[in-house]
């Protein structure tokens, strides 16, 4: 089973600052890596798929990069609505999708 | 509007069973694989099970293998999760989610809560 590790667990930043979130896989997942945003009481929202492609309607301040085992989600300038928990997710085949433990981005 | 609506959750005793349903609308259901993802209170996301477009291929997390069964009825635009031998650790909000060709979950339902307690 592929294990995803996210760092940091919590990121305390101010609006307007740049956020850099990391996701590391225990073995290569090629580019099958997605990122989600979840706010309290809401379902997760897809931000990035295939490591670097923004989902429909996602603002350009969100970007993803990486391949193999190391991936990054960058929020170029935090807006008030961006404070949330972010999860990465990979798939190997129909027998395995896994999520990382999440990074909470909170207001400093 | 593209929408997924789950139902069937509730309170059940350990060892009991529940069947969750997910009604899809606003898209061609049999064009997509589907999955169930759960979230225990205050915890992260856990993929539970997935099924391809025609039900010919399924997968399960190790934590539910042998106890849960995923299925779908494309004629009814519906996804199901039969949960048997439920345990306290199965307590969670269960979401159904649409799986894209790129293996990401692009549409999510709001979830149905399952509580396993004596």
Image (cartoon, helix red, strand yellow):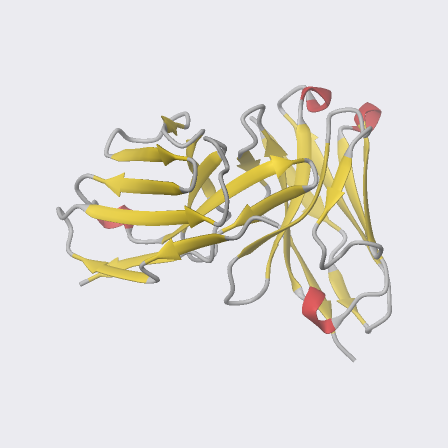
Residue B34 figure quarter: top right
Q: Quadrant of the C terminus of chain A?
A: bottom left
Q: Quadrant of residue A36?
A: top left
Asked where in the image residue A71 lies, by quadrant, the reply is top left
Taking depth in this image into account, of A12 and A100 the one nearest to the observer is A100
Image side of residue A44 versus residue A23, left or right: right
Q: Residue at x 24, y 47 (%)?
A: A20
Residue found farthest to the bottom: B118
Q: Is residue B88 left or right of residue B46?
A: right
Give how far across and how far down residue B101 sits, in percent. 58, 23
Q: Position of residue A97 (x, y in %)?
A: 60, 43
In the depicted structure, whether residue B81 falls above or below residue B30: below
In front of the other: A31 or A60? A31
Give the percent coordinates (x, y) of residue B97: 61, 39
Residue visible at 84% across and 55% down?
B66
In the picture as drawn, the residue positioned furthest to the front comes out as A27
Q: Residue at x 75, y 76 (%)?
A: B117
Q: Is residue A33 left or right of residue B87?
A: left
């Amino acid at each position: 089973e592929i294990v995803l590790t996210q760092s940091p667990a919590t990121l305390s930043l101010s609006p307007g600052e740049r956020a850099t979130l990391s996701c590391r896989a225990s073995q290569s997942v090629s580019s099958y890596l997605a990122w989600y945003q979840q706010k309290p009481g809401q379902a997760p929202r897809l931000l990035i798929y295939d490591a670097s492609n923004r989902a429909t309607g996602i603002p350009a301040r969100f970007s993803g990069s990486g391949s193999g085992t190391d991936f990054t989600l960058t929020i170029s300038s935090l807006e008030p609505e961006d404070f949330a928990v972010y999860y990465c997710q990979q798939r190997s085949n129909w027998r395995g999708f896994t999520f990382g433990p999440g990074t909470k981005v909170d207001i400093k | 509007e593209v929408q997924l609506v789950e139902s069937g959750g509730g309170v059940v005793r350990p060892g009991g069973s529940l069947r969750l349903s997910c009604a899809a609308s606003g898209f061609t259901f049999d064009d997509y694989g589907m999955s169930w993802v759960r979230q225990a209170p205050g915890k992260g996301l856990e993929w539970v099970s997935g099924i391809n477009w025609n039900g010919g291929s399924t997968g399960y997390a190790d934590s539910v293998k042998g106890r849960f069964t995923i299925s779908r009825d494309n004629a009814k635009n519906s996804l199901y999760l039969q949960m048997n031998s439920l345990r306290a650790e199965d307590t969670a909000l269960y979401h159904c989610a649409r799986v894209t060709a790129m293996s990401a979950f692009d549409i999510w339902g709001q979830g149905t809560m399952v509580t396993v307690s004596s």
